Image (cartoon, helix red, strand yellow):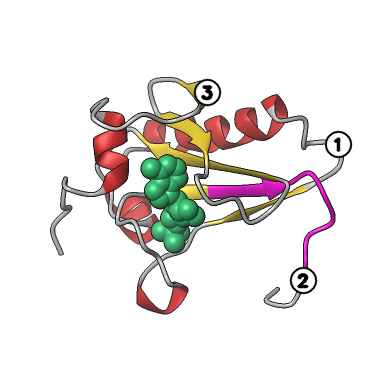
Amino acid sequence: MEYNADNVFAKILRGEIPCKKIYEDDYALSFYDINPKAKVHALVISKGMYRDYNDFVNHSTDDEIAGYSRAVLKVADILGLTGTGYRIVFNTGKDSGQEVPHLHAHILGGEPLPVDHL
Ligand code: AMP
């Protein structure tokens, strides 16, 4: 399956749609989720055009994987979650309910999180 650059996160990366930015570097852009599922709910999207976690790990460089992974942790730190804890979610493919076909991590925290699916 080809990457489709019409998705909302590609538009945010191109500056066509605004976001509430938390962090940005060469590998990632982070902003608040528009429909938060926890007291703190951030997204970290890759700068590279990858559909999902499968595509990212299969086709990115080691530098991209390291840079993106460090950006996720950096965002958790900026949000003050590293002490109290947080959850990272990569919805991937149909059964996960993934809505936006551009690699993104959800970072959830700021309160005790429900454990029903994990
Ligand atoms: P997923 O189901 O893993 O693809 O999650 C997509 C997430 O993107 C959802 O939690 C949405 O609330 C969020 N979202 C969609 N559009 C925007 C937007 N323009 N700005 C911020 N978050 C968005």
In the rendered image, is residue 23 in sight?
yes
Magenta region = 106-114
Q: Earlier in the sequence, mark 2 or mark 3?
A: 3
Tell me, yes or no, whether the highlighted magenta stretch contains residue 26: no
**In the image, residue 21 above or below residue 87:** above
Element class at badge 1? loop
Kindly indicate the quadrant of the structure image that contains residue 40.
Answer: top right
Quadrant occupied by the N terminus: bottom left
Residue bearing mark 3: 23
Residue occupying the point 61% across, 31% down: 75
Q: Amino acid at mark 2?
A: Val
Q: Amino acid at mark 3?
A: Tyr
Q: Earlier in the sequence, mark 1 or mark 2?
A: 1
Kindly indicate the quadrant of the structure image that contains residue 118.
Answer: bottom right
Residue 16 lies, in percent from the top left, at: 23, 29
Residue occupying the point 36% across, 70% down: 93
Element class at badge 2? loop
**In the image, residue 46 above or below residue 36:** above
Residue bearing mark 1: 83
Cα separation, mark 2 vs mark 3, equals 28 Å
Residue occupying the point 34% across, 50% down: 56
Cα separation, mark 1 vs mark 2, equals 19 Å
Residue 102 lies, in percent from the top left, at: 32, 50
